[in-house]
């Protein structure tokens, strides 16, 4: 993720490619102890670090009333030990209920062959809950013309496929994606629509036909209502968009091709990555908003009523130039209901960093460190500060964050090392990511590739055969907690490790994280626990009166343990481990565990 290296000056749009890392969650979970203590900036963890307010409205019991005091709030303080050390037994106790965690979880789908798409879709039904399939493309949409039903030469993706011979050798089109992946009844879709900056050169960056009018027609093709068979049956199977009048109903072309009913989706998001692959600068919030508004107008003209979404920049929405100018440019009566947050890309570096950065802390903060911390609206020292900052920015505009959907539509693609993160490093990394969105209560998350073919890590990966990677099992485990009440867990005596990120910045991270939930139907408690220490088991103490009912464990002998793709590895999968009711809750090293507790 881009991070600012100096206070933002007007007209300056230079950032280094890095990761915003701050504490996604420190130690086991936020502590309900408030102390007004000055933060000491040192090379080691401060003796008592008071984090800034974690905008979690439910914890205040008054609806959304954001407390902008950085050292106030019922769940604001997190205490750290004064030095890094290996983990020991941790004392925990249940605190107050903060919110209901009910996000739509899944991953991103990019272009794949029909053969691979069909093979991977067979695994979708094995997810225990609704699965988000987030459809994305490059800035030029891979050169796909829905009207002509063909891919145009030019984009590098064109060379990935053999367009001759059986259809199995050809890339899937939009109809294929909705039909093949949607065959699993638990699948939900979000579609990102390319929105390249007009200054991008033709060819690899964009095509001349990529206009609001073209994409309005494409959305009508996918989600609009067709006319009678007498109308659409007379059409050819391909129609050049440029030859048709503005009132032409493109849903009729979909019906002619065999799909009469509109496809279903949760939302349409305008832009893939405006601030990266699509060429929009950090100061282009207004221009991007004007372009997104043009897309919205064309979509509504064609009768598409789906909610739409826009992108939050890499800048702080509360005090920088993108968010508010963008919002000012959008319709005041048809406002966005989805906010796609900046995509955190880094997934490489030192061994510690590779698994720990979603839950890491940089004491100085990773933005606004030049400001007095008492002025921080949220905790910029913690990873995923952007979720809380966006909520505050919305509230300042008079928008209750509970009325919109905040989430992410991609994270952690690593195409340079095709299979490197098909292992427990990747599994623990994304368990930490999920622990973060559990705390921050984001509404949807597809920040990991859902299914890929050889060139990228994914939850479901194909190399000759289709494999469920360790990350797949982490998402499967997390999905079982959807709809439950998130409970604050007070912890003491938790330990931290220290590492250096790829940019050379010193960061800290908790060895152990635990999230607590309550099943509203049964009153049972659930723990989502991570021990990323390579050798030390950790016992949780203090949960007297609660007995173990079920122990579901994902564990590796080492960080390299993973499911086989092109080479042998120690296989990893979820295992149900027999436990006595009164057995100690001891988390083995390199493990992710879901524990069901009963009275």
Image: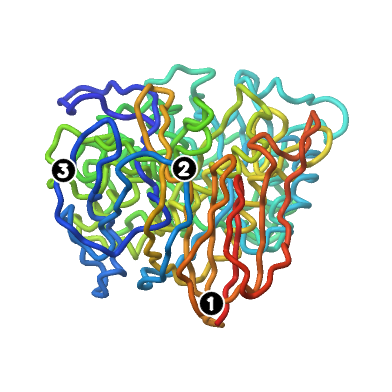
- Kind of element beneath mark 2: loop
Q: Which residue is mark 2?
A: 86
Q: In the rendered structure, which disc, 1 or 2, sits on the residue that comes first in sequence?
A: 2
Tell me: 327 left or right of 211. left
Crowd band around label 2 with a 10 angstrom C-alpha radius: few (<14), some (14–19), many (20+): some
Discs 2/3, front: 2
Judge whether residue 260 can be spotted in this image: yes
Is mark 3 in CB contact (under 8 Å) with mark 1? Answer: no
CA gap between label 3 and label 1 equals: 40 Å
Judge whether residue 148 can be spotted in this image: no
Q: In the rendered structure, which disc, 3 or 1, sits on the residue that comes first in sequence?
A: 3
- Kind of element beneath mark 3: helix
Rendering coords of residue 446 (x, y %): 53, 48
Rendering coords of residue 201 (x, y %): 44, 17
Q: Which residue is mark 3?
A: 373
Q: Nearer the viewer, residue 318 or 154?
A: 318
Q: Which residue is mark 1?
A: 546
**Residue at 81% of width from left, 39% of height from top?**
115
**Residue at 44% of width from left, 34% of height from top?**
273
**Residue at 61% of width from left, 62% of height from top?**
130
CA gap between label 2 and label 3 equals: 29 Å
Residue 454 falls in which quadrant of the image?
top right
Tell me: 219 left or right of 498. right
Tell me: 309 left or right of 182. left
Residue 593 falls in which quadrant of the image?
bottom right
Q: Nearer the viewer, residue 4 or 111?
A: 4
Quarter in which the N terminus is drawn:
top left
Crowd band around label 1 with a 10 angstrom C-alpha radius: few (<14), some (14–19), many (20+): some
Q: Nearer the viewer, residue 584 or 555?
A: 584
Rendering coords of residue 154 (x, y %): 61, 18
């Amino acid at each position: 993720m881009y991070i600012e290296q100096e206070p933002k000056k007007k007209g300056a749009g230079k950032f280094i490619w890095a990761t915003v890392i701050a504490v996604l969650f420190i130690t086991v979970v936020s502590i309900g102890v408030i102390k007004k203590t000055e933060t000491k900036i040192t090379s080691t963890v401060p003796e008592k670090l008071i984090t800034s307010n974690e905008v979690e409205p439910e914890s205040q019991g008054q609806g959304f009333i954001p407390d902008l005091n950085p050292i106030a709030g019922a769940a604001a303080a997190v205490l750290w030990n004064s030095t890094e050390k290996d983990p020991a037994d941790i004392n925990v106790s249940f605190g107050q209920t903060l919110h209901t965690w009910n996000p739509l979880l899944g991953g991103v789908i990019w272009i794949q062959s029909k053969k691979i798409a069909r093979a991977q879709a067979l695994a979708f039904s094995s997810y225990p809950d609704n699965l988000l399939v987030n459809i994305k493309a490059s800035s030029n949409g891979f050169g796909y013309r829905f009207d002509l039903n063909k891919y145009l030469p030019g984009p590098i993706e064109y060379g990935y496929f053999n367009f001759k011979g059986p259809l199995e050798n050809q890339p899937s089109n939009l109809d294929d994606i909705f039909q093949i992946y949607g065959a699993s009844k638990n699948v939900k879709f979000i579609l990102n629509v390319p929105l390249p900056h007009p200054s991008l050169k033709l060819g690899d960056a964009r095509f001349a036909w990529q206009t609001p009018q073209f994409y309005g027609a494409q959305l009508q093709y996918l989600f609009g209502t067709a006319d009678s068979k007498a109308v659409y049956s007379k059409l050819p199977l391909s129609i050049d968009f440029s030859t048709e009048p503005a009132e032409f109903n493109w849903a009729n072309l979909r019906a002619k091709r065999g799909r009469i009913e509109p496809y279903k989706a949760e939302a349409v998001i305008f832009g893939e990555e405006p601030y990266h692959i699509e060429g929009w600068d950090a100061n282009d919030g207004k221009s991007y908003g004007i372009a997104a508004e043009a897309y919205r107008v064309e979509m509504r003209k064609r009768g598409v009523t789906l909610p739409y979404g826009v992108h939050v920049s890499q800048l702080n929405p509360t005090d920088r130039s993108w968010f508010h100018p963008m919002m000012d440019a959008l319709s005041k009566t048809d406002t966005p209901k989805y906010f796609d947050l900046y995509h955190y890309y880094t997934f490489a570096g030192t061994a510690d960093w590779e698994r720990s950065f979603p839950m890491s802390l940089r004491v100085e903060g990773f933005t606004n460190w030049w400001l007095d911390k008492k002025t921080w609206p949220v905790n910029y020292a913690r990873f995923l500060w952007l979720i809380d900052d966006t909520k505050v920015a919305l509230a300042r505009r008079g928008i209750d964050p509970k009325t919109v959907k905040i989430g992410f539509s991609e994270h952690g693609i690593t195409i340079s090392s095709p299979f490197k993160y098909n292992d427990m490093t990747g599994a623990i990394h994304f368990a930490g990511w999920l622990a973060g969105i559990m705390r921050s209560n984001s509404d949807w998350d597809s920040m990991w590739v859902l299914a890929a073919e050889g060139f990228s890590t994914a939850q479901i990966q194909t190399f000759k055969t289709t494999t469920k990677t360790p990350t797949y099992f982490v998402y499967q485990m997390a999905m079982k907690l959807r709809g439950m009440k998130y409970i604050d867990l007070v912890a003491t005596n938790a330990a931290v490790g220290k590492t250096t990120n790829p940019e050379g910045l010193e960061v800290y991270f908790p060895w152990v994280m635990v999230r607590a939930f309550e099943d509203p139907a049964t009153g049972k408690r659930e723990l989502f626990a991570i021990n990323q220490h390579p050798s030390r088991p950790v016992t949780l103490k203090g949960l007297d009166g609660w007995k173990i009912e079920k122990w579901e464990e994902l564990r590796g002998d080492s960080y390299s343990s993973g499911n086989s793709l092109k080479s042998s590895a120690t296989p990893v999968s979820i295992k149900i481990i027999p436990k006595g009711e009164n057995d100690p809750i001891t988390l083995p090293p390199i493990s992710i565990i879901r524990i069901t507790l009963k009275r």
